[in-house]
């Protein structure tokens, strides 16, 4: 006589390179709100998103909290260049993520730091970055 067991529920699957503590740290830093539009996680799902999708990179300057709608817009091929210009995506080149400014919904241009925080971006660095990706 064969007995079957009920499978254990699968835990939330984290993207490659992302640990539960790193995910929590990013959500706390971003105040459980979408970095791009400000949607709070109580109002909709907010994910920890890699600015270098598919790379499995666990560096803090690569990760930010983003809602479903913003992920769709950021990763859309039609909006790729704009997403890079605004810092939401990091190009495949060997750019230093901590040096790439990103536009925050409330705080304007910031850089995400290795220590898991953010700092106001240097005005000249922002101008230089945007000029590289002007349409």
Image (cartoon, rainbow, N blue to C red):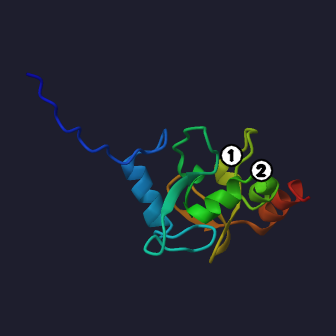
- Res 49 visible: yes
For the residue carrying disc 2, how many other residues have a C-alpha within 10 Å: few (<14), some (14-19), or many (20+)?
Answer: few
> Residue at position x 57%, y 74% from top?
38
* Vertical position of residue 47 compared to residue 30: above or below: above
Give residue 103's position: percent from left, percent from top: 69, 67
Q: What residue is shown with label 2?
A: 77
Q: Quadrant of residue 69?
A: bottom right
Comparing 112 with 37, the one in front is: 37
Residue 49 as seen in the image, left or right of residue 6: right
Q: Extreme top residue here?
A: 1
* Vertical position of residue 68 compared to residue 8: above or below: below
In the picture, the quarter occupied by the C terminus is bottom right
Comparing 122 with 7, the one in front is: 7
Give residue 94's position: percent from left, percent from top: 73, 38
Q: Quadrant of residue 109?
A: bottom right
Cα–Cα span, label 1 and label 2: 23 Å
Give residue 25's position: percent from left, percent from top: 42, 58
> Residue at position x 51%, y 70% from top?
33
- Res 88 visible: no
Q: What residue is shown with label 1?
A: 96
| Secondary structure at numbered mark 2 | helix
């Amino acid at each position: 006589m064969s007995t079957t067991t009920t499978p254990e529920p699968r835990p939330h699957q984290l993207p490659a390179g992302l640990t539960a503590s790193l995910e929590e740290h990013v959500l706390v830093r971003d105040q459980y709100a979408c970095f791009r539009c400000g949607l709070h996680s109580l109002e909709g799902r907010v994910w920890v998103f890699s600015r270098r999708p598919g790379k499995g990179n666990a560096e803090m300057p690569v990760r930010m909290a983003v809602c479903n709608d913003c992920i769709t817009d950021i990763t859309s091929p039609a909006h790729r260049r704009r997403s890079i210009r605004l810092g939401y995506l990091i190009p495949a080149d060997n750019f230093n993520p901590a040096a790439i400014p990103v536009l925050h919904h409330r705080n304007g241009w910031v850089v995400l730091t290795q220590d898991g925080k953010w700092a106001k971006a240097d005005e000249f660095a922002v101008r230089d970055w945007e000029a590289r990706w002007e349409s």
